[in-house]
Amino acid sequence: MSQSTYTSKFSAFLSLIRQAIRGSDHDYTQGSIRTAIVLLAIPMILELSLESVFAVVDIFFVGKLGPNAIATVGLTELAITIVYSVAIGLSTAATAVVARRTGEKDPDGAAHAGMQSLLIALLVTVVTSTCGILFAPDILRIMGAQPDVVKEGAIFTRIMLGGSLVIILLFLINGIFRGAGDAAMAMRSLWVASALNILLCPTLINGYGPFPELGLKGAAIATTIGRGMGVIYQCYHLFQGKGLIKIRWRHFKWDRPVIKTLVEVAWPATLQFVIQSGSWIALGILVAKTGGTDATAGYQVAIRNIVFFILPAWGLSNAAATMVGQNLGAKQPGRAEQSVVLTTKYNAVFMAAVMLLFLFFASPIISIFTHVPEVHYFGVQSLQIIGAGYIFYGIGMVMMQSLNGAGDTRTPTRINFVGFWLFQIPFAWFLAKGLNMGPTGAFIAVPVAETFIALAAWYYFRKGKWKEVVV
């Protein structure tokens, strides 16, 4: 191949990346599948990459406040995963239904479904916010926190859970954008939220200029403000009517059949992630009870780094979900399947590279965040053990999101229930308590269970029943 041909191909790829970041109307049911995946995946990866950067920056600054602060943030994040589960469940339903209507060339139906999902979200957040504000200390105690951690961290937990409205809306509205194929808008909204988080977090924790030193409380306020501004940005573009989704006042009228469809897709998706979150909560409690605060702190530092690399892979998985939904709507199940297979290959290669990074460079990575010997030890150990299963995480994520994108949220829910609750939790408990392996046993259970889940998801995807789901 000549130099000019290489130059031409490289220029074409750069042009494609610019188009993906800029955002434009594109029919994902026609033309090159590789091009469609790039146009969707690039903004989705960049969207979640900055979110993952914030997760690491957050723990970096909080880490300066000591092990109790790290443990508080980690345990709160585990508890708040229930809120994330509701948010992801509603977002999954919105993406599946909006993508299906978009593939059917019914933009008005897509906008209507999106608004109905917002009505559901507003009702749900009343419950989650109220529980978080009233029961924050009790939630930390249930999570296994020591008394001094509860005393120091209750305000952080109360603010974070009390602000669950912005968490759910941020996820949900981005799900609407993704379903419509407007991945660039979803990217920019999360950039706004994450950039503000990164700027405000050290400012409010340490106190700069006119801002008082708020410590751990400042971290929670910064996060909530950042997400809130991201939601305002989303709403501005969602309601101005210039994008792919054009909102009209009639879309706000309660529509029982559409609500019913959304709930039928959303509740298994929510349960799916509640199951997964519940398993991580159980592991967090197990680590806290068998290893104490140092093990919890080290584990949470490792988890933040694991999330840093999982979120971009999640972006690829979201691209597959949109491709599946839109192409099923366009009555092209073969193209939907080809999209998933190609996305899986890309994700597996990326995750293999991350796995090698964690296996060989865990110690210097953890050293960036803590130099406390005991915390560092557990952080390195958990990063290496959990990171060993990264290839299977990547495969499983694409398979599960593809099933969700088709509206088949029940199959992933069953897989998660068996994989996490009937296998991972008992297996972790057996290793940690039965064999006296302590936190190490909990760490080992993660890649073993995730491998099983990935293989099960691949099996059900290949059976092809997801192609027949109607939403």
Image (cartoon, rainbow, N blue to C red):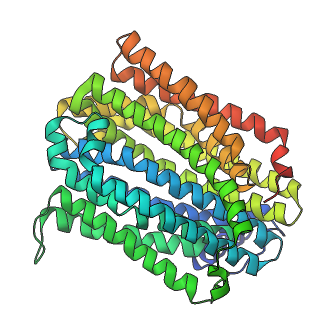
Q: Is residue 329 left or right of residue 236?
A: right
- Residue 3 in view of the camera: no
Image spot of residue 338 (x, y percent): 81, 52
Question: Which quadrant is home to the N terminus?
Answer: bottom right
Between 4 and 407, which is closer to the camera in this rendering?
407
Q: Residue at x 64, y 47 (%)?
A: 268
Dividing the picture into quarters, in which one does residue 32 lie?
A: bottom right
Residue found at the very far top of the displayed protein: 435
Name which residue lies at 33% across and 54% down. Answer: 132
Residue 396: which quarter of the image?
Answer: top right
The answer to which image quadrant residue 220 occupies is bottom left
**7 and 293: which is toward the camera:** 293
How many marks overall?
0
> Looking at the picture, does residue 274 appear above or below residue 314?
above
Q: Residue at x 42, y 27 (%)?
A: 443
Residue 131 x/y as whole percent = 35, 54
**Image quadrant in which the C terminus is located:** bottom right
Residue 383 in percent (x, y) is at 39, 34
Residue 449 horizontal side relative to residue 10, left or right? left
Residue nearer the viewer, 239 or 365: 239
Query: Residue 217, can we see it?
Result: yes
In percent of width and height, residue 394 lies at 60, 43
